[in-house]
Image (cartoon, coloured by chain):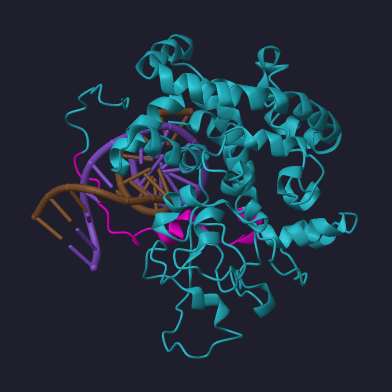
Chain colours: A cyan, B purple, C brown
Amino acid sequence: MPQLNSGGGDDLGANDEMISFKDEGEQDEKIQENAFTEGDLADLKSSLVNESEINQNSNAAVVRRGQQDEQRVYAEKHREHLDEGPKHQDGGMYKAPSYSGYPFLMLPDPYLPNGPVSPSANKVSVVQQPHGMHPLTSLLPYSNEHFNPSPPHLPTDMSQKPGVHRHQSQDLASFYPLPPGGVGQIPPSMSWQSQPVYPLSSCGFRQPYSSSLPSSSSYSRFSHSLMLGPSGMHPTGIPHPAIVPPSGKQEHDQFDRNMYAKPHSEPKREREPKKPVIKKPLNAFMLYMKEMRAKVIAECTLKESAAINQILGRRWHALTREEQAKYYELARKERQLHMQLYPSWSARDNYGKRKRRKRDKQQDSTTDNSLDCS
DNA sequence: CAACCTTTGAAGGGT
DNA sequence: ACCCTTCAAAGGTTG
């Protein structure tokens, strides 16, 4: 549905965000939607709004800053989509998908671990982490603080931006380690050992409840699960989140701690790591789900993902543009990052890896009300 | 134990 | 340009 302007192509769906908001008379819808879980939403929203406000302010600054440069480019391409301008003027986010700093170009603050209070960071923090986890940790993917910097020759621009601050390059690496070979070979030093960006364990969400994340996890989307490591996994040895062992679901922690660590360290495992699977970057909604799932679970005491996802789907629609925009932007960044790291990767690569046949999902679209917990 | 369920969005291929 | 399919997360459920 989003292929509104199909063009999206070249730049990672710049339009995505607009699309979702588009038509649908969301205004009304939102209002109605709110009804279903007022409590939850109110809560949710309040948290979002508060922070978002902050974000907006700071964000504006950032945008302003960054926009001068790259936005220029970006804007040019997507101006059409943004024509709604007026509305978003202060919304912040929408002023041109200010990609103000995309990783390699200008690592946006969000990606900077110690970065000064980065506005963008706030942006992300929009969603409060119920469990003390910094939102960024969950939203910002591909990052690893420990990730080793030995600056690999990054694909595309990375290397060409000498001007980039040093930590940037490091962070860079941390976001998305080098792709193995075409997509892949991760130099030993580069292995995702430190942190995943993509989920590692299925229990990810549950564990977070009980602990606070080490600061180091701050950038990984899955940091919680990672850090805690379902099994106290050591940070090192964790492959890049986007990369998953072919056979297994990344969720199983068995997952390869060795996969990448192995190359240079423990030779014990015989299992040869066939080539790792690089997963698709998460879209806005997926990012939202990841972040909010725990909250919903806590609030609703639900466990089934299917049910939770339904709730999240509704909540997603209930979000304001700005709120959603945050996720769209994050998703876009992820996509860009992913693209830079795995230039040759195609979504098609993973086709057939999962034998799913959605078969008839069409049928009863019973509009249950069971969506709101409580 | 793999696939299903459930959501939205992105991407790719086909027409 | 539009439509359809697949995958992304996730964890309980089902066959």
Tell me residue A366's x, y (percent). Answer: 20, 25
Which quadrant of the figure has residue A247? bottom left
A283 in the magenta segment: no
- Compared with A269, A252 (above or below) is above
Is residue A241 in sight in this rendering?
no
* Picture quarter with the N terminus of chain A: top left
Image side of residue B9 versus residue A339, left or right: left
Depth check: give the residue in front, A245 or A45.
A45
Name the dominant secondary structure of the magenta segment.
loop
Depth check: give the residue in front, C2 or A313.
A313
Is residue A169 in sight in this rendering?
yes
The residue under the point 38% across, 58% down is A351
The residue under the point 80% across, 47% down is A115
Tell me residue C5's x, y (percent). Answer: 30, 47
Q: How many marks?
A: 0
Image side of residue A212 versus residue A250, left or right: right
Which quadrant of the figure has residue A67? top right
Image side of residue A210 versus residue A73, left or right: left
**Which residue ends up furthest to the right in the rendered image?**
A163
Depth check: give the residue in front, A10 or A51.
A51
Tell me residue A68's x, y (percent). Answer: 86, 32
Image side of residue A99 versus residue A273, left or right: right
Tell me residue A334's x, y (percent). Answer: 61, 48
* Picture quarter with the C terminus of chain A: top left
A359 in the magenta segment: yes
Which quadrant of the figure has residue A175? bottom right
**Which residue ends up furthest to the front in the rendered image?**
A210
The residue under the point 81% across, 32% down is A62
- Compared with A49, A304 (above or below) is below
Q: Which residues are magenta?
A: A338-360
